[in-house]
Image (cartoon, grey):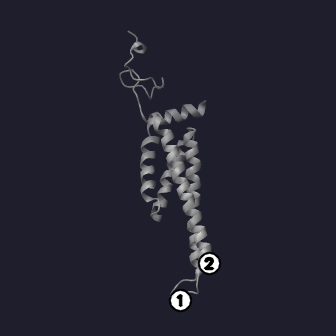
Amino acid sequence: MQPSDNPFAAPVISDHPMIRSSDGGNSYDPYPRQVPIVGSLMIAQGGLESLYGLFLYVLGGIITTVGSTPQRGEPPQWIVSFFLAIFGTCILGLGGLRISSGVFVLRRRRRILATVVNCLGLGTAFTCYCAPTSIAICIYSLIVLLQPTVAVAFAQESQA
């Protein structure tokens, strides 16, 4: 009986040697199927972070134009607006990087970039706005993207 004749056999993912199990047969690995989920989550998280960065820009403008005169011991309004603009720029940049690397992950390209961007994206956890989802997506993406079978799938896609 041939292995292909067995209807209960695990599906063949690839003939690549890294995917083969130790007994010579192909083993089923669920991680390559989770790559589109990681990409979609990265795009959604990047969108939320970008919205928050834009919100900080608007808030800085409102503080500058509508704010009252500072009381004794309060910092001038332009300093607060300046720091909000810098903070918003950093968050908006990380959100844009996360969106672009999520699109690359959906196309199975630039796996290392996605890993680095997700680790850098933990910086937005200090805003407390997206902390739980940022941490969860970072951990999940590290688990999925660092699997050897996922690396092989990305390498096969980039060669095609």
Mark 1: give few (<14), some (14-19) or many (20+) Cα within 10 Å: few
Query: Which quadrant would residue 133 be assigned to in this image?
Result: bottom left
User: What residue is drawn where x is 35% and y is 21%?
Assistant: 23
Indicate the quadrant containing the C terminus: top left, top right, bottom left or bottom right. top right
Residue 121: x and y, percent? 50, 56
Label 2's element? helix
In this rendering, position of residue 63 left or right of residue 127? right
Q: Between 115 and 66, which is closer to the camera in this rendering?
A: 66
Query: Which quadrant would residue 80 be assigned to in this image?
Result: bottom right
Label 1's element? loop
Residue 111 shows in this picture = yes
If you read the primary sequence from the N terminus, does the residue marked by circle 2 or circle 1 appear first?
2
Q: Residue furthest right?
A: 65
51 lies above or below 77: above
Q: Between 128 and 123, which is closer to the camera in this rendering?
A: 128
In this rendering, position of residue 80 left or right of residue 148? right
41 lies above or below 49: above
Residue denoted by label 2:
64
User: What residue is drawn where x is 48% and y is 42%?
Assistant: 37
Q: Residue furthest front?
A: 66
84 lies above or below 15: below
Circle count:
2
Three-letter code for the amino acid on which mark 2 is drawn = Thr
Residue 85 shows in this picture = no
Q: Which mark, residue 71?
A: 1
Three-letter code for the amino acid on which mark 1 is drawn = Gln
Q: CA distance from mark 2 to mark 1?
A: 15 Å
Residue 27: x and y, percent? 39, 26
Residue 19: x and y, percent? 44, 28
Mark 2: give few (<14), some (14-19) or many (20+) Cα within 10 Å: some
Query: Which quadrant would residue 17 be assigned to in this image?
Result: top left
